């Protein structure tokens, strides 16, 4: 209450007069510092010495007339505020003044001399100065003392919605300071919003994002390398980071590798934590990474003892040894009540542990820790306490160290394709893997059958070894004759090899009645193995321009990939001079057989189309980010999206795919191959491909799914634009919904259509850097975050009507057109 009490008016006027005269004596050049009894009025600013940050009075937008004292980036076009002083008490006019008094306190007065905000430093200064540092930190210090440990006050101790480099984010136990993020209420109102992101100190520290009091997201515990629930937090070329936890303080901090790069983390009004990088060329903030990436990041989505796997459908399952608490609710996708043990613990010495690998560790608020224990000691401690439910290493570096023990139900667990941890979950003895019996009687009963079994097993192994050796000899012979694999570089495909006669029998000797279609690689047949399993058989044609390279590439790319939105490669056959690929059979064939067919596309209502779009994004996200290698498909199109019996999309045909390792993001090829209408401009013209070229193809595919029309061959009575140009024209006229396939008119969700078209246009931008990456696409489709305005798409072309009619229909399953290395493309100007 005292900060709003008016001071003696006469004294204030005298003080203001003196400080104003002092301020007028300052030079007209930008300054970063004011001394005692100097002030800043509305319209004046302080600028850091390197001119990165500026402090003064601002209004959040043209809509709001309220004035705030804040700090923002000085040299970028987009007004980006990083800190606000009077966020809860806005000023209503421009007659305001910020004063540094002789004791070392900054005080903000409004036009009626009322104190609106104060730094409230409890330490009295000696010749104090206030300065905006190059880091964006506003500090009050003694004039000749630059030691950060001696600052009288600093804005970094009181962050708002932005986490800046060098800021210590966490808890100062000595001074009792808790430094955390709070979202703005709205984009125009910096007062505290619904969301907070802060360290929770109950149990073992973790960062919890809350909406009010409800936890929305957990970072997981620090494991020595990163927060366990943030696998994307890895060493990179943009910033370094560290975590410190001792008796004096707990903090997480990052610093930029190159100070010319601008990067910030912000807790947005929608509750999503995001890191942005400023791109000077495009003059915009580019999303670098998001804290929450998919549905499995929702806190406790699968309930207690549930585990979330974003690649499963449904995503929620139970840990081993557990079943859904309420199966009926579980079947209705209500997982909130979680899972229960199949067999209750006895705590009589017979309990043990089952290792769950590759997971995000559970909520640690009911956990304890010991940094000096090893894993074996951790297990003993857990077994001695009947309330202990699980244990894990605290630090995963150098083989693991430390002990983290849970004493409550386990919640908020998810799987990770990479970078997950091991946790040992307590189980009743009957649920543990069977161990050898201890009694001599049981040994006598078991020994003889075991010996017999081992003998039989040895015989089987010898048989399999000889059979496989013979097959490998056959493979090597074919490989040598085909000259398409360098023996010194051939990788172990880890893929079953089928006997040629097996495939002949399965397809009725490649009968025309079993033929599903024919693509660039060759014909595709439906087959049935002896065990009744249906398969799709893709046989290389002698007339095909695809051959050994594409065969080897597809096997190497897809053999180890496992995702519900990728078609599964079951095996291959390379006997009898054949190159045959065997896939799981997709009964609904390809997407193009639905959306471009006048009769069948009626069965694709909007909800199914939108679900297919989301499924394709998940498959591409896995290829680009979550797979063992970064895979670029290079031939994404409607005919290469297969549909299973539930109409879930599966990306297929990896003959043209390429993999990238490490930090590689793009590559160049002299052999440009793909499908007209789907290829990105930079790939078509210069042979440059990257994940962003797949994004372009995806954007085309989205617009085709929405409209039911092909990009190549599209016709409209009002113009001669292709589908991309047509969609762009409708977007500019705010007529997004007119793009929707007329056959589903009236049965769609307008907001979803509008967002899909908007995202599709963002994906088909001319330049790769202007397109979102797949993590961003997934985020944009799954939330209501504001979308940037798209620009005119690449290949925004007009062509003569006869050109539109000249395109051939894409065959079902797999096809592509071969483009020569000398391909030349021109860009006619639109009318």
Image: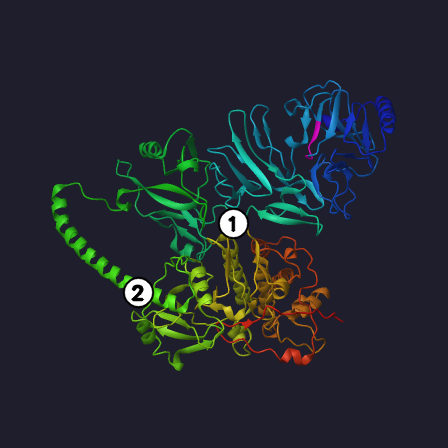
Q: Is residue 783 left or right of residue 397?
A: right
Decide which of 61, 768 is in the foreground and name it.
768
Tell me how many marks there are: 2
Q: Of callouts 1 and 2, which one flags the residue occurring earlier in the amino acid sequence? A: 2
Numbered disc in front, either 1 or 2:
2
Which of the 4 image quadrants contains residue 765? bottom right
Residue occupying image coordinates x 70% and y 21%: 145
Residue 137 counted in the magenta span: yes
Which quadrant of the rendered structure holds the C terminus?
bottom right
Magenta stretch containing residue 337, yes or no? no
Residue 35 in percent (x, y) is at 78, 24
Label 2: how many Cα within 10 Å (few below 14, some 14–19, many 20+): some
The magenta segment is 135-139
Q: Main secondary structure of the magenta part?
A: loop
Tell me the quarter of the picture where residue 819 sits: bottom right
* Mark 1 Cα-neighbour bin, 10 Å: few <14, some 14–19, many ≥20: few
Q: Which residue is mark 1?
A: 662
The residue nearer to you, when weighing 490 against 130, is: 490
Q: Secondary structure at mark 1?
A: loop
Q: Position of residue 642 (x, y in %)?
A: 47, 68
The quadrant in which the N terminus is found is: top right
Q: Residue at x 51, y 48 (%)?
A: 298
Above-or-below relation of 776 to 184: below
* Residue 566 visible in this rendered orientation of the protein: yes
x and y, in percent, of residue 311 in the image? 45, 56
Q: Residue at x 43, y 38 (%)?
A: 396
- For the question of whether residue 584 can be seen, the reply is no
C-beta proximity under 8 Å, tags 1 and 2:
no
Q: Position of residue 499 (x, y in %)?
A: 31, 69
Helix, strand or loop under label 2? helix
Real-space Cα separation, disc 1 to disc 2, in angstroms: 35 Å
Q: Which residue is mark 2?
A: 471
């Amino acid at each position: 209450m005292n900060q709003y009490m008016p001071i003696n008016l006469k004294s204030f006027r005298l003080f203001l007069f003196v400080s104003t005269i002092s301020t007028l004596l300052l030079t007209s050049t930008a300054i970063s510092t004011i001394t005692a009894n100097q002030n800043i009025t509305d319209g004046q600013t302080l600028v850091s010495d390197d001119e990165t940050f500026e402090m003064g009075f601002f209004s959040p937008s043209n809509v709001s007339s309220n004035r705030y004292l804040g700090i923002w980036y000085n040299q970028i076009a987009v007004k980006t505020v990083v800190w606000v002083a009077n966020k809860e008490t806005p000023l209503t006019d421009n007659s305001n003044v910020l004063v540094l008094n002789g004791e070392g306190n900054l005080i903000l007065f409004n036009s009626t001399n009322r104190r609106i905000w104060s730094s409230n430093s409890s330490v009295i200064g000696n010749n104090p100065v206030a300065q905006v540092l190059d880091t964006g930190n506003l500090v009050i210090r003694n004039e000749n003392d630059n030691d950060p440990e001696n600052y009288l006050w600093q804005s970094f101790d009181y962050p708002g919605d932005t986490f800046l480099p060098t800021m210590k984010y966490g808890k100062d136990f000595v001074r009792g300071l808790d430094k955390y993020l709070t979202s703005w209420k709205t984009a125009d109102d910096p007062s505290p919003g619904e969301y907070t992101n802060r360290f929770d100190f109950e149990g073992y520290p973790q960062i919890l994002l809350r909406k009010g009091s409800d936890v929305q997201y957990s970072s997981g515990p620090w494991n020595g390398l990163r927060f366990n629930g943030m696998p994307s937090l890895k060493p990179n070329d943009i910033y370094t980071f560290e975590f410190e936890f001792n008796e004096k303080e707990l903090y997480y901090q990052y610093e930029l590798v190159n100070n010319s790069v601008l990067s910030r983390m912000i807790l947005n009004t929608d509750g999503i934590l995001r890191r942005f990088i400023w791109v000077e060329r495009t003059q915009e903030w580019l999303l670098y990474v998001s804290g929450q990436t998919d549905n499995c990041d929702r806190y406790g989505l699968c309930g207690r003892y549930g585990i979330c796997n974003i690649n499963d459908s449904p995503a929620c399952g139970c840990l081993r040894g557990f079943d859904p608490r309420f199966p009926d609710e579980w079947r209705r996708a209500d997982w909130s009540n979680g899972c229960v043990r199949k067999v209750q613990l006895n705590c009589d010495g017979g309990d043990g542990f089952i290792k769950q690998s590759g997971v995000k560790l559970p909520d640690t608020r009911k956990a304890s820790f010991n940094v000096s224990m090893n894993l074996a000691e951790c297990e003993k401690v857990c077994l001695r306490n009947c309330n202990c439910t699980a244990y894990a290493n605290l630090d995963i570096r150098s083989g693991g160290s430390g002990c983290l023990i849970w004493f409550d139900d386990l919640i908020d667990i998810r799987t990770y394709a990479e970078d997950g941890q091991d946790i040992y979950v307590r189980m009743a003895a009957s649920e543990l893997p069977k161990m050898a019996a201890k009694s001599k009687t049981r040994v006598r009963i078991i020994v003889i059958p075991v010996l017999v079994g081992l003998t039989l097993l040895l015989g089987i192994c010898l048989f399999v070894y000889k059979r496989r050796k013979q097959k490998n000899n056959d493979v090597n012979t074919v490989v040598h004759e085909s000259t398409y694999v360098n023996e010194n570089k051939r990788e172990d495909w880890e893929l079953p090899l089928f006997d040629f006669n097996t495939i002949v029998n399965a397809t009725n000797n490649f009968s025309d009645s079993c033929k599903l279609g024919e693509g660039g690689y060759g014909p595709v047949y439906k087959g049935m193995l002896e065990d009744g399993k249906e398969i799709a058989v893709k046989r290389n044609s002698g007339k095909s321009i695809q051959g050994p390279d594409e065969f080897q590439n597809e096997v190497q790319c897809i053999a180890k990939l496992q995702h519900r939105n990728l078609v599964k490669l079951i095996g291959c056959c390379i006997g009898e001079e054949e190159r045959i690929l065997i896939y799981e059979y997709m009964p609904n064939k390809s997407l193009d057989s639905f959306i471009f067919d006048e009769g069948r596309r009626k069965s694709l209502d909007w909800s199914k189309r939108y679900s297919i779009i989301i499924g394709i994004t998940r498959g591409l996200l896995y290829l680009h980010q979550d797979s063992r290698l970064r895979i670029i498909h290079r031939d994404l199109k409607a005919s290469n999206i297969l549909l299973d019996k539930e109409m879930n999309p599966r990306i297929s045909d990896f003959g043209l795919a390429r993999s990238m390792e490490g930090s590689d993001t793009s590559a160049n090829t002299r052999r440009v191959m793909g499908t007209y209408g789907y290829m990105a401009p930079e790939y078509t013209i210069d042979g440059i491909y990257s994940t962003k070229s797949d994004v372009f193809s995806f954007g085309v595919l989205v617009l085709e799914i929405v409209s039911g029309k092909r990009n190549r061959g599209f016709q409209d009575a009002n113009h001669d634009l292709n589908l991309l140009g047509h969609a762009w024209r409708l977007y500019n006229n705010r007529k997004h919904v007119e793009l929707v396939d007329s056959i589903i008119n009236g049965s769609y969700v307008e907001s979803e259509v509008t967002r899909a078209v908007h995202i599709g246009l963002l994906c088909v931008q001319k330049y790769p850097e202007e397109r979102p990456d797949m993590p961003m696409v997934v985020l944009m489709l799954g939330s209501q975050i504001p979308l940037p305005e798209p620009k005119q798409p690449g290949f925004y072309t007009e062509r003569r009507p006869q050109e539109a009619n000249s395109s051939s229909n894409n065959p079902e399953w797999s096809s592509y057109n071969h483009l020569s290395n000398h391909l030349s493309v021109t860009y006619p100007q639109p009318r």
